[in-house]
Image (cartoon, rainbow, N blue to C red):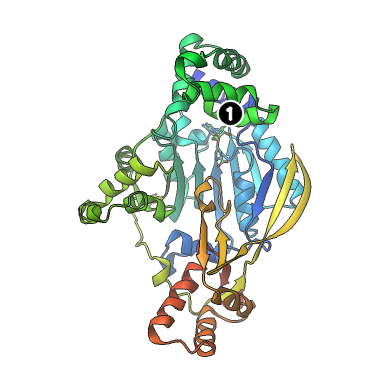
Amino acid sequence: MISPARSEFHRRIQDQYEAYPFPWFDVIEAEDPEGRLTTSWNLDLGLPPEAWLPERPRVWVAGASTRAAVQLALQHRGARVIASDLSRESIALQSRIAEQLGLDNIEFRHEDLTRAGYRGEFDFVSCIGVIMILESPEAGLAALRAAAAKGGVVEIMLYGTIIRADAMRSQEILRTIDPDCGARERMALALRLFSSVREGRLGRTHPLVAMGRELAGARPEQLNNLADVVTHPYERAYDVYEVCEMMRRAELHIRSWKNPLLWQPERYLRSEKLAPKLAALGDVDRRQLAYLLGAPLHELFVEDAARPRRFVPVEEQPVEELVARPLATYLEHRFEGDQLVRTRRRPRLVRHPRGYKVSGGERRPGVSAYWQWRILPPVTARVLELADGRRTVGEIERKVAREEKLARREREALRQLLRQLLVPHSRLLAVHPRGA
Ligand SMILES: C[S@@+](CC[C@H](N)C(=O)[O-])C[C@H]1O[C@@H](n2cnc3c(N)ncnc32)[C@H](O)[C@@H]1O
């Protein structure tokens, strides 16, 4: 339970999320209808085989809010999940969602993550969009680090300064006018204030004018999501250098940044002439540049800096011996308010002139950018047919190579394709140890 001696800061944050649980959603996707992605997860995390997560991982979702623990538990039915949040409303909402989806592997706790006191208990800790709204981000990071078991991985998402600039500006405007009002009063103030911004003076495209329009046209449930942007009591944001420094101070080692493609500056520039200059930059400078150009969210996997494990990319993982199963469809659970109204199976692949298109979808909490489409070659369909839950990745590779009479270079392309099909963005195969 929350200590009665909590600070004014905590009270305000709690008030905000009691009044406006966030995020408000109408769909939850289950990438794997069977909910058995734990072996695949090891590939996402780049863990060396000797440190792979157990089949029944212990998971802590710190600041779980309305759906984050459900999203993880749906993918990992064997996981034992603790979901903590300061907002009773959010926790209550999420437990109703979990119940309707038949999830019995989540325990919801109303608690302050910085005081929860977990010690070495979790194989995986997820803390998305929370650290920067804590009174002490340092205390938050220390709590996450302490909670991770030996070899445990921590997932963190922090806001970037660029993407949150308009949000922080409106929050500051509201604070300047009335620093003491509660969450609902602040929303009433925002509605009044932003609708009175003079479009004629500022111009139609001015961010504050746009905010006024958005607020005025919002349905009641959309206000929950706008509240997290426009009327949040207090948040921070960071650039890449600040994130790295924060992790260093917290004695957390950055294993990897999610969505590697988004962190390549070349992605945002066309000039070939610049390529050597970009390539000559150090890793952190390249990331900072990609951040300045594309402003991706800071989404990281970190671990205790005292015991870092090597990062093993999927290309180097021993996947040949793993049995593969197709993920050609996903489940879309549709909600109206807190009521599950429909569950549908949806295809992942769409035909395309060069083969198929696949969308990463909303596969993990907080990773909206996986929505980008990828083009996959026609042979993908044959791979999915062969992945019958009995053949291994190696067997599928050899069979397709024989059937298609592939030359050495084409065989290498097939090998790479198969590995691409094992990780987010274009994951179409789930893997398991033989006999599991
Ligand atoms: C932006 S939402 C998080 C969203 C969620 N992690 C997700 O990915 O959907 C922030 C959440 O953190 C919670 N929170 C803020 N401070 C907290 C604290 N000290 N302990 C636990 N939860 C906290 C809030 O109540 C709110 O539900």
- Look at 60% across and 17% down and name the residue there: 191
Judged from the image, the secondary structure of the residue bearing numbered disc 1 is helix
- Look at 39% across and 65% down and name the residue there: 313
Occupied quadrant, residue 288: top left
Could you say which is closer to the camera, residue 364 or residue 124?
364
Q: Is residue 284 left or right of residue 178?
A: left
Q: Is residue 2 above or below residue 150?
A: above
Picture coordinates of residue 70, whole percent (x, y): 64, 48
Q: Quadrant of the N terminus?
A: top right
Picture coordinates of residue 229, whole percent (x, y): 53, 28
Picture coordinates of residue 213, whole percent (x, y): 58, 23
Q: Is residue 25 above or below residue 6?
A: below
**Which residue is outermost to the top?**
177
Q: Is residue 98 above or below residue 405?
A: above
| Amino acid under disc 1 | Leu
Q: Quadrant of ligand 1?
A: top right
Count every numbered label the image shows and give the total. Answer: 1
Occupied quadrant, residue 47: bottom left
Judging by the rendered image, the residue that carries numbered circle 1 is 226
Judge whether residue 7 can be spotted in this image. Answer: no
- Look at 56% across and 74% down and name the residue there: 380
Determine whether the beta carbon of the residue marked 1 sits less than 8 angstroms from the nearest atom of ligand 1: no
Picture coordinates of residue 392, whole percent (x, y): 55, 80
Judge whether residue 359 can be spotted in this image. Answer: yes
Could you say which is closer to the camera, residue 362 or residue 180?
362
Q: Quadrant of the C terminus?
A: bottom right
Classed neighbour count for the residue bearing mark 1: other residues with Cα under 10 Å, few (<14), some (14–19), many (≥20) = many
Could you say which is closer to the camera, residue 409 or residue 246?
409
Q: Is residue 85 left or right of residue 96?
A: left
